Amino acid sequence: MSRPRVLVAGTYDAIDALSQALGGEADVVAARSLKEALTELQRGSFDTIVCSVRFDESRMFEFLQAIMERKRAVRIVAFRVERNALTQSTRSAIRNALEALGVERFADLSQLRAEYGEDVALETLRKMVLDDTFSPPAPPP
């Protein structure tokens, strides 16, 4: 069985966090700019595309829109690695915008780290990226 191919579009911190979470269970292709990510999409197929919120000066939504325009069936995971906490309303706004684009998997590693610790945060991200049946935990009220 071949290893899954994962495209991660993100900052250096995001790429490091995803690589740590996957622990070698997937072939990770990293892109640090929108142009680089779109080029990688043209070069090959991916089982999962992962994009960090701060990707290429906060161009995550532009990248996700470009993916949706290509009408490829692929699992997409959005995540955030910054250590500062978001307000509930900001987190909800991000989730709503992602859902409008058809992205159902979003992990705020800062929130997960604060609530459950580093290991659970990385394991949650790993499962979101690799597990077809994984449903992310419901956001807190």
Image (cartoon, rainbow, N blue to C red):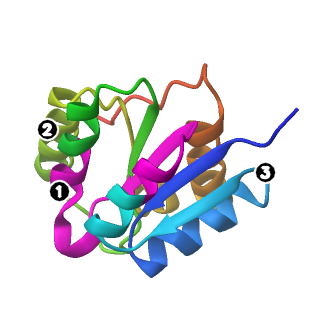
Residue drawn at x 58%, y 36% is: 47
Residues at marks 1 and 2, CA–CA distance in whole angstroms: 16 Å
Residue drawn at x 20%, y 33% is: 69
Image coordinates for residue 22, horizontal then vertical, percent: 70, 55
What residue does disc 2 label?
97
Residue drawn at x 21%, y 48% is: 91
Who comes first in sequence, dot 1 or dot 3?
3
Instruction: Classify 13 as above or below 129.
Output: below
Which of the pair 54/49 is nearer the observer? Answer: 49
Three-letter residue code for mark 3: Glu
**Residue 87 — which label?**
1
Of the two numbered discs 1 and 2 in the rendering, the one whose residue sits closer to the viewer: 2
Which of the pair 34/125 is nearer the observer? Answer: 34
Image coordinates for residue 60, horizontal then vertical, percent: 23, 56
| Residue sitting at the far top | 133
Image quadrant where one finds the N terminus: top right
For the record, the magenta segment spans 40-64
What residue does disc 3 label?
25
Q: Quadrant of residue 37?
A: bottom left
Who comes first in sequence, dot 1 or dot 2?
1
| Residue sitting at the far right | 1
Judged from the image, the secondary structure of the residue bearing numbered disc 3 is: loop
Q: Is-magenta flag for residue 54?
A: yes
From the viewer's perspective, tell me whether residue 32 is left or right of residue 130. left
Residues at marks 1 and 3, CA–CA distance in whole angstroms: 33 Å
Three-letter residue code for mark 1: Thr
From the viewer's perspective, tell me whether residue 31 is left or right of residue 54. right
Label 3 Cα neighbours within 10 Å, binned few <14 / some 14-19 / many ≥20? few
Residues at marks 2 and 3, CA–CA distance in whole angstroms: 30 Å
Q: Is-magenta flag for residue 47?
A: yes
